[in-house]
């Protein structure tokens, strides 16, 4: 665990997503939850060591399975975008088996403990902006639509720390399989033009970064859009888009995810962005 600013802690070593903890006089506000039960229990114990008070809130930065499946281990009310809250409501009582199988395939050892546990629903949701005051600290929550319709970021004015969720990732290619890439680029531009100082950027995955890391994600997305737009303009067969797989896989050379899993995700990204551009072109 690293304290990147006073009372702001992050952990980037868990398998999958980054998690954060903001210590207030009233207790901890958690940003996301580790992807696997063993690591979620470990995180819960470490948060208790930071503050003897109970966790006050969990802020979920999107509705992906690797962020939502283990919220129960922190035993706290969830704050999320309304689209994430709606997704959680749609699961009724149990998480879908497909979410569990996807996580288990990424890490079979840690995935053994995954189960169709009861769904934790959001207690508070918002659509665009939300201010949260707790224990003398202000948090600004804002929509970062693009990676998912339920993506959010969190900014702490007192310390200049920004948690971006998957709007920004480092050491890995952003996964675009369900993205609205045009909106994603707008969300990135919003971060790049943020009116207040940003001293630390905590991405959804990978090492902390600065605005250069934000630009790198925008460049990746724009590169894929440009590549596929040219492909479509040249009226090349759709199945030939897989020839670009190695080009975009190179962006993830330093990441810890299994190569075959990454290849599959980039394949999905290429397919999705191709179809997204075709739809935008009226085809």
Image (cartoon, rainbow, N blue to C red):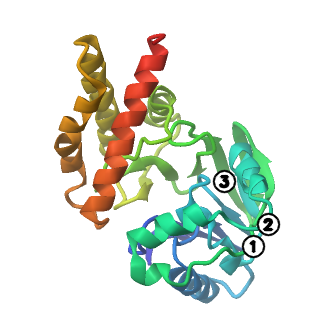
Q: What element carries label 2?
A: loop
Question: Residue 6: horizontal and vertical position, in percent?
Answer: 52, 69
Measured Cα–Cα span from mark 2 to mark 3: 31 Å
Q: Name the residue under label 2.
A: 93
Q: Is residue 58 left or right of residue 263?
A: right
Cα gap from disc 2 to disc 1, whole angstroms: 6 Å
Mark sitting earlier along the chain (2/3): 2
Please give the name of the residue rendered at 52% of the width and 71% of the height, measured from the top-left corner.
35
Give the mark, 2 or 1, whose residue is nearer the N terminus. 2
The crowd level at tag 1 (other Cα within 10 Å; few <14, some 14-19, many 20+) is some
Residue 31 point in image, percent of width and height: 59, 63
Measured in 3D between alpha carbons, the distance from the residue under mark 1 to the one under mark 3, in whole angstroms, is: 29 Å
Q: In which quarter of the image is residue 1?
A: bottom left
The reply to whether dot 2 and dot 1 touch (C-beta < 8 Å) is: yes
CA neighbours of label 2 inside 10 A, class few (<14), some (14 to 19), many (20+) = some
Q: Name the residue under label 3.
A: 139
Residue hosting label 1: 118
Rendering coords of residue 42 (x, y %) = 54, 86
Q: Of discs 2 and 3, which sits in the foreground?
A: 2
């Amino acid at each position: 665990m690293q304290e990147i600013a006073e009372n702001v802690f992050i952990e980037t070593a868990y398998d999958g997503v980054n998690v954060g903890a903001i210590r207030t006089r009233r207790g901890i506000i958690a940003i996301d939850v580790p992807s696997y039960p063993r690591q979620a229990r470990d995180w819960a114990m470490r948060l208790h060591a930071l503050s003897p008070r109970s966790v006050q809130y969990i802020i979920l930065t999107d509705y992906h399975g690797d962020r939502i499946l283990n919220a129960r281990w922190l035993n706290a009310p969830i704050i999320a975008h309304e689209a994430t809250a709606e997704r959680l409501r749609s699961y009724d009582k149990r998480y879908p088996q497909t979410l569990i199988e996807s996580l288990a395939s990424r890490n079979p050892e840690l995935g053994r403990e995954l189960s169709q546990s009861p769904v934790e629903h959001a207690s508070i949701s918002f659509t665009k902006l939300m201010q949260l005051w707790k224990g003398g600290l202000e948090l600004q929550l804002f929509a970062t639509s693009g990676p998912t319709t339920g993506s959010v970021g969190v900014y702490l004015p007192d310390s200049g720390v920004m948690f971006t969720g998957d709007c920004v990732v480092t050491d890995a290619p952003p996964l675009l399989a369900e993205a609205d890439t045009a909106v994603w680029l707008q969300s990135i531009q919003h971060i790049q033009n943020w009116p207040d100082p940003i001293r630390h950027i905590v991405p959804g995955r990978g090492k902390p970064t600065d605005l250069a890391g934000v630009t790198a994600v925008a460049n990746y997305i724009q590169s894929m859009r440009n590549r596929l737009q040219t492909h479509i303009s040249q009226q090349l067969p759709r199945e030939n888009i897989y020839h670009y797989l190695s080009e975009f896989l190179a962006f993830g050379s330093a990441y810890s995810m299994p190569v075959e899993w990454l290849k599959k995700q980039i394949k999905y990204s290429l397919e999705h962005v191709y179809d997204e551009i075709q739809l935008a072109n009226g085809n």
